[in-house]
Image (cartoon, rainbow, N blue to C red):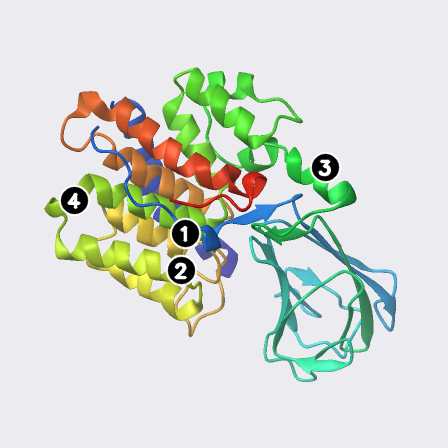
Amino acid sequence: MARGRRTRVEKGWLAGAERESRIADNVVGRAPCAHPVPQEHVLQTVNPVLLTLEAIQGAATGRTIVVRDGQTIQVGRSKWADLCLSEDDQLSEVHFELQCDWRGCRIRDLQSSSGILVNDAKIVAAPLHSGDRVAAGSTTFTVSIQGERLAAGQPATGAEATAAEVPPAAVYCQGLRWSEAARQLLQDDLPPADYLDRLIAAELLTDAVRFLAAWLPKPAAVAWASGCVRSVLEETAKPADQAALDAAEAWAAQPDETKRRAAADAAKACNNSGPAASVALAAFWSEGSLAPPNLPPVPPPPTATAQSLAAALMMAAPIGIPTQAPQRYRSFLESGKQLGTAPETAGRNST
């Protein structure tokens, strides 16, 4: 039952953004994006993250838990858990949650009866790193993480440096809607900046917007799109629109659950409609749960933020003089592209 509701909620909430995105594909607007995103919002993805927990001791010895980039998985002894370890009767029905996203990998205790130990310390929530040991129920796991993430400006070395120079564009294209022409331009090992250049050169501007919204880390992407929408709306923005953009930018500057929920409330005040509301919804859909706090968690689809941001920019671009939309798209893309390539030119001033 819960699984069915989850699918309907996700599809319903995303349907509007997808529909507006399709309409915007056929429209061609006005002012440049004049709001740069602060450098501290930019994170560098060296490789797509893959989290593995291998049970090495206890009732579930030999079992392996794998969490891919963008996934959230709940683990316990019952079928209510995403991953059931029924062999360990010391686990709670839904014992803990594992999450991988733009911030890295984390574990969270779901009010289990016996708790969780990470490296022999009891935790409520904690980041995970390769080599950590996690104890839950009667089982002990070792942690390994493939693909680390570095803050902008942090030097990479060895194999990480090579991966940082040539991150694959294909990773960011999964789960999004692309034109056939955009698919033909994509190659397996093509770096994101090169793929973005190809899309722009081919005049596939809406595909380029979608790709950039997916490539940038979520806080950077939200702040970028919010600045672009502001530059379009200018003095014509209604108070509710301004509040929605303010809420999205507050989350982007300091992502936390309170600000994420505030962004959802601000979008609702805009009737969940329009470019400002779509930016605020993108912040809300970045992580956590779509359900109210008192209900079982419903994780958002991994591509929800990128889809909502792309829809926001596609709605904003035709405002005013529709024939100027291509020029406006290029301005959006230029400001966002600087964020995507910022880690490669660490130390350069962001203006």
Q: Position of residue 31 (x, y in %)?
A: 21, 33
Tell me the CA gap for discs 2 and 4. Answer: 21 Å
Q: Where is residue 161 in the image (x, y as percent from the top left)?
A: 71, 41
- In the image, 288: left or right of 155? left
Which residue has dot 1 on it? 38
Question: Which of the marked residues, 2 or 1, is nearer the chain's N terminus?
Answer: 1
Q: Is mark 1 on a helix, strand or loop?
A: loop
Q: Residue at x 46, y 30 (%)?
A: 177
Question: Which of the marked residues, 4 or 3, is nearer the chain's N terminus?
Answer: 3
Question: Which of the marked residues, 2 or 3, is nearer the chain's N terminus?
Answer: 3
Which residue has dot 4 on it? 234
Q: Do the residues labelled 2 and 4 touch (CB within 8 Å)?
A: no
Task: Using the rendered image of the protein, determine whether residue 270 is visible from the camera's viewpoint.
Answer: no
Amino acid residing under circle 4: Glu
Residue 252 falls in image quadrant: bottom left
Amino acid residing under circle 1: Pro
Question: Which of the marked residues, 1 or 3, is nearer the chain's N terminus?
Answer: 1
Tell me the CA gap for discs 2 and 1. Answer: 9 Å
Tell me the CA gap for discs 4 and 3. Answer: 42 Å
Which residue has dot 2 on it? 253
Q: Is mark 3 on a helix, strand or loop?
A: helix
Q: Do the residues labelled 2 and 1 touch (CB within 8 Å)?
A: yes
Question: Which of the marked residues, 4 or 1, is nearer the chain's N terminus?
Answer: 1
Which residue has dot 3 on it? 162
Dot 1, how many residues are within 10 Å of its Cα: few (below 14), some (14-19), or many (20+)? some
Residue 334 falls in image quadrant: top left
Name the residue nearer the viewer: 45 or 88: 45
Amino acid residing under circle 3: Thr
